[in-house]
Image (cartoon, coloured by chain):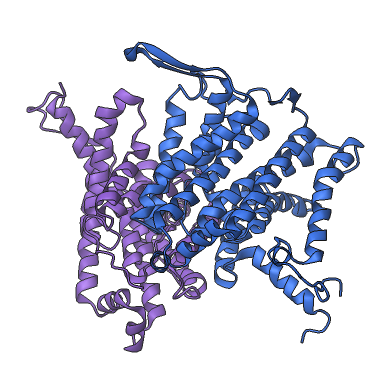
Chain colours: A blue, B purple
Amino acid sequence: MLYREAGQFKTTYAEDMAIFPIRQDRMALAILLGIAFIGVPLLADFDIWPFGSDYLLRAILLPFLILALAAIGVNILVGYCGQISLGSGAFMAIGAYSAYKLGTGVHIPLAWLGFAISIPPLPVLLSILLGGLAAAVVGILFGIPSLRIKGLYLAVATLAAQFFFDWVFLRVSWFTNYAPSGSVNAPTLDFFGLNVGTPIERYMLCLIFVTVFAVLAKNLVRGNLGRQWMAIRDMDIAAELIGIRPLYAKLTAFAVSSFIIGVAGALWAFVYLGSWEPLAFSIDRSLQLLFMVIIGGLGSIMGSFVGAAFILILPIMLNLIPTQLGVPLSTETITHLEFIIFGSLICYLLIKEPHGFARLISIGKEKLRLWPFPY
Amino acid sequence: MIALGQFLEVLIGGLMSGVLYSLVALGFVLIFKASGVFNFAQGAMVLLAGLALVRSLDLLVANGFSLWAAIILGIGFAAVIMAITAWLIERFVIGPLVNQDALTLFMSTIGVTFILEGAAQMIFGSDAYPLRLFPTDAWFLFENLFPGGILVNKLDVWGGFIAGILVAGLAIFFQRTKTGRALRAVADDHLAAQSVGIPISWIWFVVWLAAGLVALVAATVWGTKLGVQFSITFLALKALPVLIIGGLTSIPGAIVGGLIVGAGEKIAEVFLGAHIGGGIEYWFAYVLALAVLLVRPQGLFGERIIERI
């Protein structure tokens, strides 16, 4: 009886087109944001379990937020525009390494022209955003083939990006500032004189990024551009006939998606990893992001969060539950079980519920509206 | 100046490893031809077949079987495993997804990949196991013509030989047998094939079984070369550009594509990679594929894709 929208009349167009037209949804979101923005820091500050130790913040919430952000990016491309991409890891890497270069100072020696381009180290926030921008530019470049090819062929084209950039960041030592080991350290996280160091500060930083981008993305996919993407996804030729320009729609999808993935990559490197090597952004990362989107829900911003949470929590659960039951599994078995469970889940969801957990949640809400009288 | 002998050696080595890529790509083509499914799981199937073979071989030899009996029994066992896998995949994944769009099917095979990788390693172990079915030593040819001769790996020659037999066998199967004809009918139009009485689920089982057996062959050759281990699944990723270059529906295309990729990446690695940092064979095949895609999206031997609303 709690979830009922009877009596909530909408009297203006603005109300009718609100992101969350139902009051209960708004309240739920407000509570969630309240917990995330105020509750967690307070609990962490007062050392209240389970937030007292850094483990939860550092090992679960931080990767959850960043991967959810990346999943939103992937979802825009795969879920909203229907352009399958297996190269998301590469775009995260581009974001990370561009931000790293910009954050530590760029020096391009153009000896044969007689001068050199030097850019002093930029502020961290600016480098993260510019890292996203670099990823967007490369994303557009690799999106160009999508105008001629689609579906599986495009998947191979994006794989090309993945393998190429894996190699570039491993072998071209300019990107790693000639670090002998190939591993690089992020610059100090300094935001307008505010130093972000402790887990809770890092958490808040990512939370702000994720919230802002999630709201922007949600609005973008609801608007003109998002509708164009969805038309292209559903049937590109028909979309073209009703006046949507495939060039514009596909390339904007690639640009926006790569931008968000690039920012997520920069955050992943700067805030979560601190020091990293190209392996952090391998093809496994691409597949992981794709799974989040499939499991969470293709074409759903909320689904990106659910998918990210699921992918992160399942291994921990697999570790925890058998140990609690007294039959601890070996790490190897857990890894294999994880593989099997992810695989089965993907197959099951594709067969039974192609829109993932997000769709299950909305079915649950539909049922709640009628509860306790189903008819 | 590049010595001709060295060039020939690199070229032959590349062509030979290209044949092996073709072996993996063939499995893809079989399934794509008959069901329009782009089978990402082919690499995982190679891993599964290889693990089943090598583990049963070890077990049989340890229990006092002679090597030849063990090889025959082991290959039989691995074939049975592939048959069971084919049946399970058809029954539980591809069957229920009939008539879905290609992208959904593709993603479901990514799911299958993960199930197979997890299950294969859980059942058969996850170490690297050596497999010795073929001689792996090298021949030196034309020693009087070029200084040092041209080094050719015996295993690669075996691989080429086996691939040839396999392709001939598949061609006969597709062209001459009743099941082969039914298979081509299903590939053309599921619905029409079904309405003239072709049992579509049986056909798909046969196709996945054939792909499984091709995977088994690929596993014996690759396993001898690299040992049977998890990294063998990356072969699938190497086979993708092969497919794109050759065309998704063409068996000769898979062979030619494999040769192009194998030769191209070795030549690029040796003669170009030296100048720009090395290791470029990881992505060179993809760049080749990208170039082919832009010029001729259907591949060298593929059918032209015509779309209607």
Q: Where is residue B131 in the image (x, y as percent from the top left)?
A: 39, 46
Q: Quadrant of the N terminus of chain A?
A: bottom right
Quarter in which the C terminus of chain A is drawn: bottom right
Q: Which of B304 and B238 is in front in this view?
A: B304
Q: Residue at the location (61% across, 29% down)? A: A126
Rendered residue at 70%/39% (across/down): A206
Position of residue B17 measured from the top left corner of the image (x, y, whole percent): 27, 43
Residue B202: which quarter of the image? Answer: bottom left
Q: In which quarter of the image is residue A60?
A: top right
Q: Which of A130 and A355 is in front in this view?
A: A130
Q: Which of A273 and A147 is in front in this view?
A: A147
Residue A372 lies in quadrant: bottom right
The answer to which of A46 and B17 lies nearer the viewer is A46
Residue B246, compared with residue B226, is above or below; it is below
Is residue A283 visible from the viewing direction of this image?
Answer: yes
Q: Can residue A79 be seen in this view?
A: no
Give x and y (percent) for residue B188.
Answer: 29, 75
Compared across the picture, whether A120 is left or right of A55 comes to left
